[in-house]
Each structure stands twice: as C-alpha cells, then as structure tokens.
Image: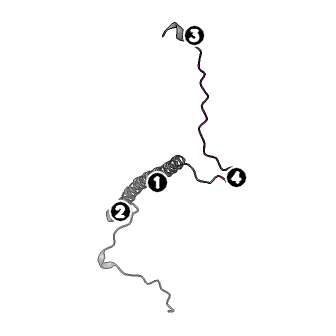
Amino acid sequence: MAAADWFAPATVAEPLRPARRRPRAAAAPRSGRRRPAQRRIRGHIAWMTAFALLLAGVVAVNVAVLRTNVAVHRLDDQRARLEARNQMLASKLSALSSAPRVAAAAHKLGLVEAPAASTSYLDLAPRGR
C-alpha cells in the first residue's frame, strides 16, 4: 500500500437492504401444532416417564415378594418348632401312661393285682329296666 492510498477520497458503502421476509398473516390464529423437535422431546419425556413408572412397579412387586418369602420362612421355622414340641409331648405322654409305670404307681398305693380267675363284672344299671 502506498501512502497515496491513505489520503484518497473514501468511498462510502451503501447500506444493505433488509432481506425480504414473508408477510405474516396478522389475523390468522396460531394453530395448535408444535414444531417437530418439541413434539419429539415431549414424546421422549412421556416414554421415559412411563418406563420409570414401569420399573418402579417391578421394584415394588419384588419387594413385596421378598417380604412374603421372609414371612413364609418365619412361619416354616415356627411350624417345625411346634411339630418337634408336639412329638416330644406325645413321647412324654406315652411314657407316663405305659403299663409298667401305672403298675408301679398302683403298687406304691398298696394295691395288688387281682388273679385273672377271680375277675367278675358288676352291673350298675337300675333294676327297673
């Protein structure tokens, strides 16, 4: 660049004309249609919400099943303990009502066994029948 160009008369640029815009209908009401990107985002949010609710339901069902299994396990343990106690009590009852034990208790009270040949029956029914 030469020094002469610095002092040359400047040319003024003309302003740009604004780009033509399509005229907007002032009286036309806006339709309820959304832009496709907004619809897509809202659709994704709806699907994610539905999926989250579905997962929450699955988790709730799993928790309920686990609680039920714990309760069943406790009841099984209790049933096993009660069955063992019943068997122990039945064994104790059988031992206490055995014939040798009853004979020993009768002998302590001074009772003696009657001979089998002298056994007779007593009728306690009223005679007027």
**Residue holding disc 3:** 7
Gap between marks 4 and 2 measured at Cα: 103 Å
- Report the side of 4 relative to 111 (left or right): right
Q: What residue type is labelled 3?
A: Phe
User: Between marks 3 and 1, how big is the CA–CA gap?
Assistant: 87 Å
Label of residue 61 in the image: 1
Mark 1 nearby-residue class (10 Å; few <14, some 14–19, many ≥20):
few
Q: Residue at x 36, y 81 (%)?
A: 120
Give the mark nearest the N terminus, 3 or 1. 3
Q: Mark 4 or 3 closer to N-term?
A: 3
> Seen in the image, is 87 located left or right of residue 71?
left
Q: Is residue 107 rendered magenta in the image?
A: no
Mark 2–mark 3 distance (CA, rounded to whole Å):
133 Å
Q: What element carries label 4?
A: loop
Q: Give the range drawn in magenta.
A: 10-29
Report the residue marked by disc 2. 94
